[in-house]
Image (cartoon, helix red, strand yellow):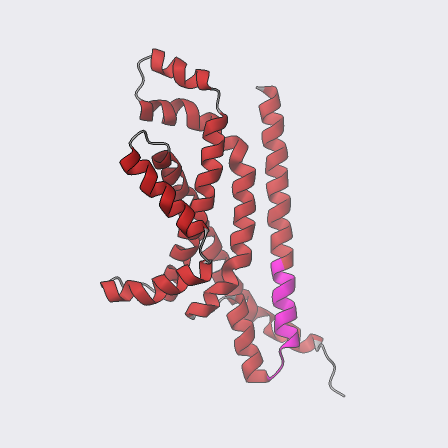
Amino acid sequence: MTPIFNWSFALEILPTLGSALIVTVQATLLGMLVAVTLGLALAMLRRSRLHIVSLPVAFVIEFVRSTPLLVQMYFLFYVLPLTGVQMSPLATGILALGLHYATYCAEVYRAGIEAVPRGQWEAATALNLSRWRTAIDVVLPQAIPPVVPALGNYLVAMFKDTPLLSAITVVELLQQSKMIGSTTFRYTEPLTLVGLLFLALSLVAAWGVRGLESRLQRYGGKR
C-alpha cells in the first residue's frame, strides 16, 4: 500500500521547492519596497492642502483597498501590454503587490503623522521651515518608528498573498508544487511542504516584527 506521505519523495523535491521559495521571497521583499515607498508618498499627498491633490489620492486609496488583489493583478497582467508596457509576469506581480499594499501602508503612515503633536508643526513654522521641510526633517523622524511594527505585519500578509502570483504564471511556491503534483501525481508531499515553508517563514517574520516592536518601545521609553 502506498503511504500517504513519502518522506524520501519529500526530500527529493525539497530543492526544487527551495528554488521557488527564492522567487516568493524576492517578490515579497521587492513588493514591500514598492509598498513602503509609494505608501509614504501617498500619505504625504493625501495630507496636501490642495483638494485637487488630496481628493484623487484619497479616492485611489479607497478604490484599491476595496477591490481584490487578484483582480488588480489580472488587470495589470492583461491590460498593461495593451498600452505598450511589457513586463515579465514576476515584475507584474511585484507591481501588483506593491500597489495594493501601498494603500494600506499609506494609512499606517498617515496615522503615525497625525500622532505627532501639533506643537512640532507649529515650532517648525516658527523657525520658518517650509511645510515639506517640516515633514521631512521634523515630523517623519518621529512618525515612522512607531509604525514600523504595523508595516512589518503587512510584510507578513504580503508574503502569504504571494500564491496569487501563480494566477499570472509566476512559478512561485504554490505553482511549483502544482507542477510537481501534475507530473508525479503526488500532491500530498509538495503541498504539505509548501504549507510548512509558509508557516516557518511567517513565524520567523512575525517574531522579528515583535522583536523590532519591543526594541522601538524600549528606545521610545529612553527618549
Question: Residue at left 33%, top 31%?
Answer: 48
Point out residue 109 in the picture as x, y percentages from the top left corner: 46, 36
Q: Report the front residue among 164 and 56.
A: 56
Compared to residue 120, the image places residue 65 above or below, namely: below
In the rendered image, the residue lying farthest to the bottom is 1
Answer left or right for 128 relative to 118: left
Examine the rendering and report whether any part of residue 30 can be seen: no
- Magenta-drawn stretch contains 186: yes
Q: Report the front residue among 170 and 54.
A: 54
In the rendered image, the residue lying farthest to the top is 126
Q: Report the front residue among 67 and 120.
A: 67
Question: Residue at left 70%, top 75%?
Answer: 7
Answer left or right for 193 relative to 164: right
- Magenta-drawn stretch contains 112: no
In the rendered image, the residue lying farthest to the right is 1
Q: Report the front residue among 130 and 66.
A: 66
Bounds of the magenta segment: 185-198
Examine the rendering and report whether any part of residue 17 can be seen: yes
Compared to residue 93, the image places residue 219 above or below, namely: above
Answer left or right for 92 relative to 52: right
Main SS, magenta residues: helix
Question: Residue at left 62%, top 75%?
Answer: 12
Compared to residue 6, the image places residue 122 above or below, namely: above
Work out which quarter of the rendered image holds the C terminus and state it. Answer: top right
Question: Residue at left 43%, top 71%?
Answer: 169
Point out residue 188 in the picture as x, y percentages from the top left corner: 66, 76
Point out residue 26 in the picture as x, y percentages from the top left corner: 46, 56
Work out which quarter of the rendered image holds the N terminus and state it. Answer: bottom right
Point out residue 15 in the picture as x, y percentages from the top left corner: 57, 69
